[in-house]
Structures are given as structure tokens and as C-alpha cells.
Image (tube, helix red, strand yellow):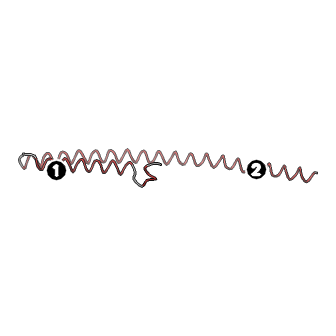
């Protein structure tokens, strides 16, 4: 059973992890013995890094989703072709059987 079937996607888990990590880092900074200016600069740097990582992960997730959709479309076309061939073969077999039983 995939994560999607369980209701939690890998993207949700990763974004939650990154958000938790950023929150934890922010809290650690609040309790660190630094001046206000140093703390604000550090928080700004960490926030910028977190936003960049989240954007990067979102882009990767979009690319993977697009690839999965394209693969799914190709699979559907392939299966549709196989099914159409099987139906046609069944019709031909039924037609031949009718001809055989009619000739008897």
C-alpha cells in the first residue's frame, strides 16, 4: 500500500518535517544568548534557507508528479490498445465460430 493510499503523501511528510525543523531552529535561536540584532539576522538567514529548500522540494515534487502523470497516460494508452486488440480477437473468434456452426 503506497503512502498516497494511506492518505499521507511523501510531499506532506517532507514539508511537515522541514516546517518542524525550521520551527525548532527558530526556538533554539530564541533561547540562545545572542543580542537582538544577531538573533534577527540569524532568524532571517534560517528563514531564507528554509524557504529556498521548500521551493526546491516543491519544484522537485511537481516534476515527479508530471512524470508520473505522463507515465500513467502512456500506460493507459498501452492498456487500451491491448484491450482493443483482445476485443477484436474475441469478435473474430465469435464470428468464425458462428460461420462454423452455420455451415454444419
Mark 2 Cα shell of 10 Å, populated few (<14), some (14-19), many (≥20)? few
| Left or right: residue 58 compared with residue 85 | left
Mark 1 Cα shell of 10 Å, populated few (<14), some (14-19), many (≥20)? few
Q: Earlier in the sequence, mark 1 or mark 2?
A: 1
**Farthest-out residue, bottom:** 7
Q: Which residue is mark 2?
A: 90
| Left or right: residue 94 compared with residue 56 | right
Nearer the observer, 70 or 103: 103
Nearer the observer, 104 or 96: 104
| Left or right: residue 84 compared with residue 53 | right
Nearer the observer, 24 or 98: 24
**Farthest-out residue, right:** 104
Q: Which residue is mark 1?
A: 27
Q: Position of residue 32 (x, y in %)?
A: 10, 46
Q: Secondary structure at mark 1?
A: helix
- Residue drawn 68% across the image and 50% down it: 84
Q: Secondary structure at mark 2?
A: helix
User: In front: mark 1 or mark 2?
Assistant: 1
**Farthest-out residue, left:** 35
- Residue drawn 25% across the image and 50% down it: 20
**How far, Cα to Cα, is label 1 from label 2?**
68 Å
Q: Position of residue 47 (x, y in %)?
A: 21, 48
Across the whole image, how many numbered discs are drawn on residues? Answer: 2
- Residue drawn 17% across the image and 48% down it: 44
Which disc is residue 73 wearing?
A: none
Q: Position of residue 11 (x, y in %)?
A: 37, 49
Asked if the residue at tag 2 contacts the one at tag 1, i.e. Cβ–Cβ closer than 8 Å, the answer is no
Q: Position of residue 6 (x, y in %)?
A: 43, 53
Amino acid at each position: 500500500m503506497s503512502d498516497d493510499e494511506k492518505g499521507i503523501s511523501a510531499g506532506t511528510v517532507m514539508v511537515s518535517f522541514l516546517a518542524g525543523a525550521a520551527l525548532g531552529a527558530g526556538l533554539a535561536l530564541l533561547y540562545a544568548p545572542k543580542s537582538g540584532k544577531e538573533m534577527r539576522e540569524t532568524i532571517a538567514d534560517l528563514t531564507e534557507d528554509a524557504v529556498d529548500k521548500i521551493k526546491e522540494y516543491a519544484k522537485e515534487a511537481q516534476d515527479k508528479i508530471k512524470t508520473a502523470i505522463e507515465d500513467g497516460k502512456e500506460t493507459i494508452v498501452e492498456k487500451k490498445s491491448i484491450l482493443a486488440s483482445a476485443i477484436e480477437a474475441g469478435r473474430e473468434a465469435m464470428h468464425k465460430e458462428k460461420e462454423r456452426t452455420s455451415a454444419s
